[in-house]
Amino acid sequence: MSEAIYCYDTASVRFAVYPQDKLRIVAEIEENPLRDLFGATGGGDTLLEAYLSNREVINALALEKYRGAPGRPVLLASVDFAIHQAA
């Protein structure tokens, strides 16, 4: 089961991740990486499916970004994945 929804107003998928300390972090991934990197081709349902199919990678990056700046909103964009791959 996943806590994820497509948010039409922000063109993103909002999802929950849980760090080891049992906090609940709400993060978002923009539409562009879901289309460009994870293969979504249609509307909100395919964006959500792209997240669900790749949630391990996406959640891991969201947690990494959260740990780098606790307390700040976690919004993943295509550039975050490019930076992560280059490191």
Image (cartoon, rainbow, N blue to C red):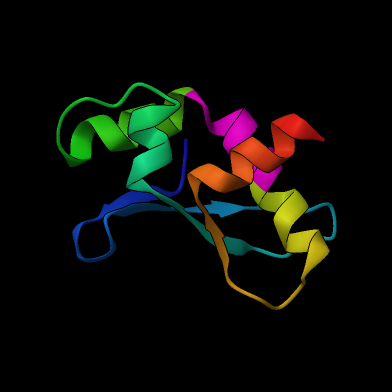
Asked if one can make out residue 22 in the rendered structure from this viewpoint, the answer is: no
Q: Quadrant of residue 37?
A: top left
Q: Position of residue 82 (x, y in %)?
A: 62, 37
Is residue 86 shown left or right of residue 76? right
> Where is the C terminus found, in terms of image quarters?
top right
Is residue 29 shown left or right of residue 21? left
Q: Position of residue 76 (x, y in %)?
A: 53, 52
Question: With respect to residue 61, does 86 lie above or below?
Answer: above
Span highlighted in magenta in the image? 54-61
Is residue 56 shown left or right of residue 35? right
Q: Position of residue 26 (x, y in %)?
A: 54, 63
Question: With respect to residue 25, does 51 lie above or below?
Answer: above
Residue at position x 51%, y 26% in the image: 54
Asked if one can make out residue 67 in the rendered structure from this viewpoint, the answer is: yes
Question: With respect to residue 15, does 75 lie above or below?
Answer: below
Between 10 and 5, the one lying in front of the other is: 10
Is residue 82 shown left or right of residue 27? right
Q: Is residue 45 magenta?
A: no
Residue at position x 54%, y 54% in the image: 16
Residue at position x 33%, y 45% in the image: 31
